[in-house]
Amino acid sequence: MKITFNNNLKYLKNAFSVFFLISVIFSFELKAYQIEEHQAKAAQLYEAYRQAENESLKLELLSSMLMEIHYSDSAQTYYQEAITLAKKIDNKELLAQNINRLGVYYRNMNLQEEALKMYEEALEVSLQSGESIQIGHSLNNIGQMYFYRDYFDESLEYYLQAEQKFLEVNDLNGLGYNYTGMSLVLSELGRYREALEKIDKAIEIREGLGQKRQVIVSRFNKADILMALGNYADAEKDILMLYEYGKTYDKVRAIHALEKLVELNVKKGDINQAISYAQIAEEFHKEKPNSESMIEIYQLMNQVYFNRGDTLMSAKFQNLLQSERNIINAEKTKIYLAGLTIKNQKNEIEFLNRQQTLIQQNERFKAYLLVGLFIGILMISIAYFVVYRSLKKEKTSLRLLSEQKAKIEQQADELARLNQVKDKIFSILAHDLKGPLNSLSGLVKLIQEDDLTKEEFSSYIPIIAQNLGNNNILLENILAWSRSQMQGLEVHNSQLRLNDLIQKNIEFLYHSGYYKGQIMINEVDENLTAMADRNMIDIVVRNLLTNALKFTKQNDQIIVSAFEKEGKITIKVTDEGVGIMRKNLPRLFGTEFFTTPGTHQEKGTGIGLILTKELVQINKGDIWVESEYGAGSTFYFSIPKAD
């Protein structure tokens, strides 16, 4: 049976209308204290919207109603209706507003790509209308999405543009959100003083507007910056404000505050107070689960008891940590499935619109097609006759040209590769190796001129030693990789005690520039031995550990383990870092130099993983990686087991 576009759309609207009435009352995302505040108003607006006949009034009522049900699953279809209506009557202000809000809805459902598309579309609409407030909110939202993706420089650029728009119209509410978000970006860039200036402005604005809850949230964000600066006393005051608020109104926020209090007291060395806060968090967690914060707390407690030598308690918190991670993974799956449903609903509505357009276009196309086919057949016949006559004559010439072209292209590719190798090595020698040597040269000069005190000399030694240590790793990679390019590497097999080799590299890297307070754990069996070239496997392990340190933050765990299978030993290096985008996975072990900045904007050369792959393969092994962006990575490599 044929179903028309209008009937389909009407069916979807009726279905979502019923779902809306149910979700207003029973939505699981609606907190208890919000129900009475929003339910009556949403119901009144919905009834007025149904009875309204004027399209402008319907759009205003629909937009107001969406403000009350933006938390509801049924909001999506009404956003689509509001957007369609706004386009129909050419109300660009409400069009941009509803597109922006739909983007927020997608963002909350973890559909980041869809959210970014909405924000960019809202920006385009608001730029056409010249509405500064909506332009500011669109820029602000895009900046937030880039922040989530760790593109901090791009994020800051959008926040700065949004700030100018809010300042033009003196939109204090918009500036409150803008300065709060911008402070987080500046903090990630290490510009802590500027971050403090922005968050203080946000707090001042929100206090002036009487936004009590937003003030507490901004102060909590400020605490993160203060902790990074080592100002624990002031940070603790701001965290306690959110804790006291959360105890009364929102236990989830209270647990989030307790997470920071545990971290702060661990950093201060007040372990007993940290344990006390962790115990309170566990009690709140039973009432209002907050697995994300509890994961951080359990991880800190695991490390605290591990450092104390209390293996029983450490194991307890390790088990709790794994349990909460399982809960988080289950929730992510649920959100992902819900997101797919929403995306399918959106695609279905868009499909119906496209179907109607295609039906109209199809009728016109049929007429043009008949004429085009006749002309095309005539032209093809003429062309075929001409081509056939010249084809035999040119066939031999084309074949020779094709062979010459392929040969030239092959030579050009090889030349380009060799030039790239040369340029890369010169670049590394000119920049990455030059800096620490200049520092050492400057220090020697100061010593010769007697411009350094003994205390100043002592303070410079660790910094220079650390830089030279990092360059030692880099230089070792360059020399080994250069020999492999010239086919000069020879394998000298010996029995390797893997636990000793890995432990030696862990201890070495604790003193490198890549170490930022991460927790490196060696779980390899002490009796496990492999048959391979010691120096080559040493470089492989060091490169993989360095890579893990580069893309993790303080307190993240890096675990090295191993297992036997089919006469080979597989070593795993697992981290809790930022992970790798799916599109970048094929590039990691390719032939081109590929690198991305670390969590502290550490730069790389791209040689490490290329060399690692070559060394593993020379030793009759394989290497591969598994990663989820935002959830860490695991690198595997296998080598022969010793007899």
Image (cartoon, grey):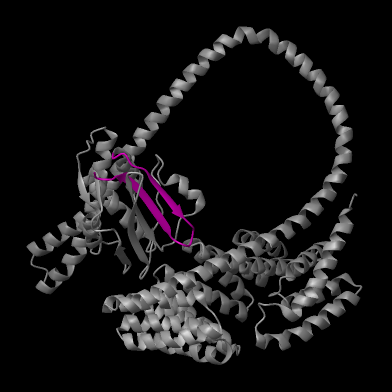
Q: Quadrant of the C terminus?
A: top left
Instruction: Name the residue nearer the viewer: 434 or 325.
Output: 325
- Residue at 56 percent of width and 14 percent of height: 398
Instruction: Name the residue nearer the viewer: 570 or 368.
Output: 570
Magenta region, residue range: 619-643
Visible residue check, residue 555: yes
Instruction: Name the residue nearer the viewer: 20 or 92.
Output: 20
| Residue 389 sits above or below residue 19 on the image | above
Residue 101 placement: quadrant = bottom right
Q: Is residue 626 magenta?
A: yes
| Residue 276 sits above or below residue 360 on the image | below
Residue 282 percent coordinates (x, y): 47, 84
| Residue 621 sits above or below residue 625 on the image | above
Q: Is residue 150 magenta?
A: no
- Residue at 42 percent of width and 50 percent of height: 625
Residue 262 placement: quadrant = bottom left
Q: In the rendered picture of this protein, how many numbered marks are placed on residues?
A: 0
Residue 451 placement: quadrant = bottom left
Residue 283 percent coordinates (x, y): 49, 87
- Residue at 74 percent of width and 60 percent of height: 345
| Residue 551 sits above or below residue 136 on the image | above
Q: Is residue 259 left or right of residue 74?
A: left
Residue 253 percent coordinates (x, y): 53, 83
Instruction: Name the residue nearer the viewer: 351 or 132.
Output: 351
Visible residue check, residue 124: no
Residue 294 percent coordinates (x, y): 46, 77
- Residue at 33 percent of width and 77 percent of height: 312
